[in-house]
Image: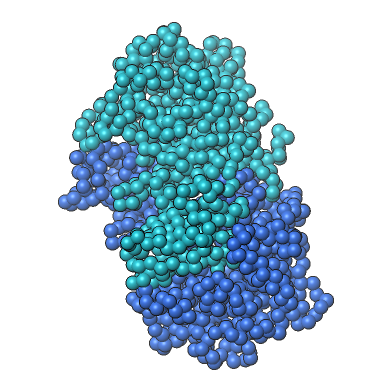
Chain colours: A blue, B cyan
């Protein structure tokens, strides 16, 4: 499919630096044992700027900023981060950088009981024997729901690249409430909700989540046709925000990398680093050009309504055809493939909704694609998709992701240069149009080291405020006290309110935040105490507690009220299938209890007014103390019950 | 057993405040739905000082301290924290408060592959079917190994209260390398290594770890004799530092709470809150007096050598008799029960080795016990154990743990008063002797809220430097941006270098650090890169990689070298039992790779020069992409292999 992309296009910047990249990128494969990624740190030619300069490292507040958060004072922003292969979502405060919470999603959290309680198992999904179907995950991208082009504090969506799932986190409780597995794909990577409906102007909020599949596979993937790599395919998926059902999928050429959505609801976009559809490393980077691929949402949904889809294997999800061959006529096309320099990674839309910035990864450039021009192409009013590119500034080595300040500047992370480069959008457009007098790159700041995502406060909304940028860097090397062979990564807070970027502080982050978003604190309205009625199985008072037997199935109901459980003991018989239901009757904020059973590998917590349950087999006879694991009271240590299992 | 403890003893402070505590402690049980623990915050009588005063909250460095750690600068201290029912160990830097690492121990960590790799499963322990025996844990106390009375940077030991295990963490790699389950006990709580041998002066380092069991159970605990609570017993255990085998156990009256060890190696101590040996809440707090129990290590080990022990059930561990009835003669006694006011919690030895401070929990006092006097009792030269108490200052409500500054001051956390109280050891002794002119309490600082452990920099060693104290508080309530019903706890850094304590900053900590230690950074010598030879199953180069079949058992050997795995694909048959062995040949510090298999619920990382393996059943046919999960290189996304499972 990508033949035409291998031909350099007018407007392409000088590719001498890119040729350099090709050369050194292969060095890593030569078996020299030296990684290119880090070798760059020691390569004067490629990355002289990577030295650990502290030129900007003064924290005295040159811009008048006071970044300290004194004891008892609250942070100004929330930062939510995906946690990579740790499988959770993290919640930080800015500007302090303090971590407030880890929200378990795809992992097991034995403190909370996530993956242990019946309620969490039902969300995660189980095998027929009741064991968890998965307890690993790889979260890369997380984005909250929108209303009117800004965050509405309802939901956060996060991907699992490892087992192909999309999870939803409620922002009031900051707990995961739904997980959906996507069929027909592998390597689910880019994730972004829409911002409004493409057709109905009354629907000015997120109702869809777009999901890109990075890895191509045989369809269906059942162990036949596995040799012919040319037939492997990737799909782009759409999940319903409320039901979390998969609405539809699109068969495409190439693969999906990052995902963006337009402010008018009309388009979704994904970068494609493997338009070659190669299965091997060097194939994936052989073409000089790849694509930023756009999806016309209204047309796709009309095609589904018109029955123009197929399904694969056991999946009932409608799959429409978004390949180039099937979409030659722009006026009916579901997809538009815009050529950009090789192996692009990030795609980010500017807060005014006008431009998508694709960063080139193996090209030292960013490509700016005009939203209106892509719409023109779909209307048949633009000759070539490539004409939608309105700027392609050369900004540095290894550009990945671009953030915005709402004042006309873009900030792109440079993985190889270990820098943030600040560039003018207008300047880049004018320069692309031939104006040699404009300054495109207006500032550079060293970061430590090798940044992945960079993102600004409210920067992916119409409320972009241009105050802070965080650079989530992939290597910390010598920035923190050493803690063994596994290093943390570095999250650096940068003040972007002035002309020059200013490094505020370094925070270590456990592997491995990929993407984060920064939200003004007033948008989030957390719920501090549950309501008893939210839980159909709530035990409403000590009078309802007791041991209820039905053959060898036993339900033990109890309540917690500091510093005691309502049952001081409960008797079982060896071999019983036991379900414990525990309601925390305490109503005071922050008064959480835990419930652990000695040697029975069971622990979970109940927050104020919450109910949870666990089911297990009483397979060991004896006395087993149950105790409160979550400090609650001066007599917390004495807060116990006894499980007596008769032989 | 505790008859004599119910009689007030000379030297007992006025108990009017304690009677108040008895009254309100029961209020929580009355079903009013109001927790005493937190109700105290709103009770003018009990805890007027709990208001969120910020009197000391200025961070400008009144003591000339500069607490900021600028970008690129290193912290001065490591802080290691137990993580409660999260089951891991955390590593922080001070004074910044930044978290560098979480070391998985009793939990599953799907980022590292802890609980997933064969190597980690062998450490954690498995069922006959290969599944993990436990994947929960409740870590409370962690203490490093000693040489010459100070930390030697070798090991860290941490308990699991939930499944009764002791884990050892290597301080060079900061990874857990051994886990031992303790027999015959439940509620393994207090944990402390010894500091030298009680007999052999040449052994000036830790060779034993002492472990206290909090919950009493029938012995053996097999489902018979479960009704007679009076026969339930607790044991005190000793584990060998090197072999991690259980050396011996001691049968005791009452239970074990916190544990301390003497600098001369002669004694171990544990507090006892349930000398009543009650199974119910109100029984556990009925006696006015409980104990601090001392163990004579040399005598216990001689008794074991002399064959004066029994064993229980399947366990081969020798158990000596440390009950009061069996140890009436001090000159041969293995144990000494020193009466202290009711329900003591913490016990901490002063850095000069002279005093144990027990804090009273339900008494507003701390008891100071002289080490020499306990030795005198064992020599028959002290009439009553209670005479070993040399001070018992009234310091405030809910005292739990005491730390030291090496300048003669003690710092006790007051759970109910939400304060740190600084008191003079000499002053307290003189006051106890009747000198009314001395000032015992020299400073108080509000903390937020309800502190558990408090600990000072190097404070549990002879190198105690009196610079910082950290208060790990159980409730954060309003100190941070709200994150839903589950709140973080608060870890507050306090400068204790001056006369007045000074609050430096608040750090949120995810539930729930119980105990921590602060170590000077020069003591820790982390290893940044493994050696290939450490791993018997290392794959030494691409030439050794391949697929090795033996019937349906298949071993897949491969190496990683950024940005590629040595096998681009490997073929299996559905139903194969597959073991993947992966060696990371990259030698550059911080260059970690991950290995995940799509939809197969497998992920783990390999640090530089490390080898790991996983075993699983190839139960799904098709093409499954394996990919690097730990960012390594500009072409990290392209770093993949293909697992082809033929139907």
Q: How many marks?
A: 0
Location of residue B234 (image quadrant): top left
Q: Residue furthest left?
A: A551
Using the image, determine if residue A605 lies above or below residue B595: above
* Quadrant for the C terminus of chain A in the image: top left
Name the residue nearer the viewer: A441 or A202: A441
Using the image, determine if residue B147 lies above or below residue B646: above
Q: Residue at x 35, y 21 (%)?
A: B304
Q: Is residue A243 visible?
A: no
On the image, the x and y values in percent for residue B74 come to: 67, 44
Q: Residue at x 65, y 39 (%)?
A: B76
Q: Residue at x 52, y 14 (%)?
A: B432
Using the image, determine if residue B469 lies above or below residue A481: above
On the image, the x and y values in percent for residue A618 come to: 25, 46
Location of residue A247 (image quadrant): bottom left
On the image, the x and y values in percent for residue A391 come to: 70, 78
Q: Is residue B526 visible?
A: yes
Using the image, determine if residue B214 lies above or below residue A425: above
């Amino acid at each position: 499919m990508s033949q035409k992309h291998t031909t350099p296009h007018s407007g392409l910047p000088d590719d001498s630096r890119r040729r350099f990249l090709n050369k050194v990128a292969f060095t890593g494969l030569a078996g020299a044992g030296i990684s290119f990624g880090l070798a760059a740190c020691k390569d004067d030619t490629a990355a002289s700027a990577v030295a650990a300069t502290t030129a900007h490292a003064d924290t005295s507040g040159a811009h008048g900023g006071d970044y300290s958060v004194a004891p008892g004072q609250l942070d100004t922003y929330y930062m939510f981060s995906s946690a990579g292969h740790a499988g959770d979502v993290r919640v930080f405060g800015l500007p302090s950088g303090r971590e407030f919470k880890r929200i378990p999603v795809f992992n097991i959290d034995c403190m909370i009981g996530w993956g242990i309680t019946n309620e969490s198992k039902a969300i995660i999904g189980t095998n027929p024997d009741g064991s968890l179907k998965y307890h690993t995950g790889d979260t890369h991208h997380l984005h909250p729901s929108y209303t009117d082009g800004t965050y509405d504090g309802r939901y956060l969506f996060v991907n699992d690249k490892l087992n192909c799932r999309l999870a939803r986190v409620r922002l009031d409780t900051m707990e995961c409430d739904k997980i959906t597995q996507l069929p027909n794909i592998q390597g689910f990577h880019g994730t972004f909700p829409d911002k409004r409906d493409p057709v109905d102007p009354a629907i000015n909020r997120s109702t869809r989540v777009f999901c890109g599949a990075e890895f191509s596979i045989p369809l269906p993937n059942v162990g036949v046709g596995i040799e012919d790599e040319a037939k492997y395919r990737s799909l782009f998926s759409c999940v319903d925000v409320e039901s979390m059902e998969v609405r539809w999928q699109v068969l495409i050429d190439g693969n999906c990398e990052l995902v963006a959505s337009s402010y008018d609801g009309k388009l979704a976009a994904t970068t494609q680093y493997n338009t070659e559809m190669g299965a091997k490393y060097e194939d994936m980077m052989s073409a000089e050009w790849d694509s930023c691929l756009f999806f016309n949402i209204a047309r796709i949904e009309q095609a589904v309504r018109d029955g123009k889809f197929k399904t694969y294997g056991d999946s009932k999800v409608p799959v429409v055809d978004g390949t180039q061959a099937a979409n030659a006529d722009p006026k009916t096309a579901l997809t538009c493939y815009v050529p950009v320099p090789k192996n692009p990674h990030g795609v980010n839309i500017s807060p005014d909704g006008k431009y998508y910035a694709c960063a080139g990864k193996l090209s030292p450039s960013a490509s700016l694609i005009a939203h209106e021009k892509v719409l023109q192409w779909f209307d048949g009013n633009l000759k070539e998709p490539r004409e939608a590119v309105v700027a392609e500034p050369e900004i540095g080595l290894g550009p990945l992701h671009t953030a915005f300040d709402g004042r006309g500047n873009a900030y792109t992370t440079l993985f190889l240069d270990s820098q943030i480069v600040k560039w003018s959008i207008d300047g880049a457009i004018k320069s692309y149009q031939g104006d040699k007098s404009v300054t495109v790159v207006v500032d550079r700041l060293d970061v430590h080291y090798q940044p992945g995502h960079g993102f600004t406060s409210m920067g992916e909304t119409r409320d972009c405020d241009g105050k802070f940028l965080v650079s989530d860097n992939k290597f910390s090397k010598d920035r923190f006290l050493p803690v063994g062979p596994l290093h943390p990564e570095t999250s650096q807070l940068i003040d972007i309110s002035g002309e020059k970027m200013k490094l505020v502080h370094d925070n270590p982050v456990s592997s491995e935040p990929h993407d984060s978003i920064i939200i003004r604190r007033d948008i989030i309205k957390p719920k501090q105490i549950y309501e008893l009625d939210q839980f159909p199985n709530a035990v409403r008072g000590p009078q309802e507690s007791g041991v209820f037997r039905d053959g060898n199935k036993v339900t033990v109901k109890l309540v917690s009220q500091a510093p005691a459980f309502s049952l001081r003991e409960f008797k079982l018989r060896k071999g019983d299938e036991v379900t414990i239901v525990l309601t925390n009757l305490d109503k005071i904020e922050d008064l959480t209890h835990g419930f652990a059973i000695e040697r029975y590998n069971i622990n979970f917590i109940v927050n104020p007014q919450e109910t949870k349950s666990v089911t297990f087999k009483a397979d060991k006879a004896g006395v087993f103390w149950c105790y409160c694991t979550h400090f609650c009271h001066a007599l917390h240590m004495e807060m116990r019950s006894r499980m007596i299992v008769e032989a």
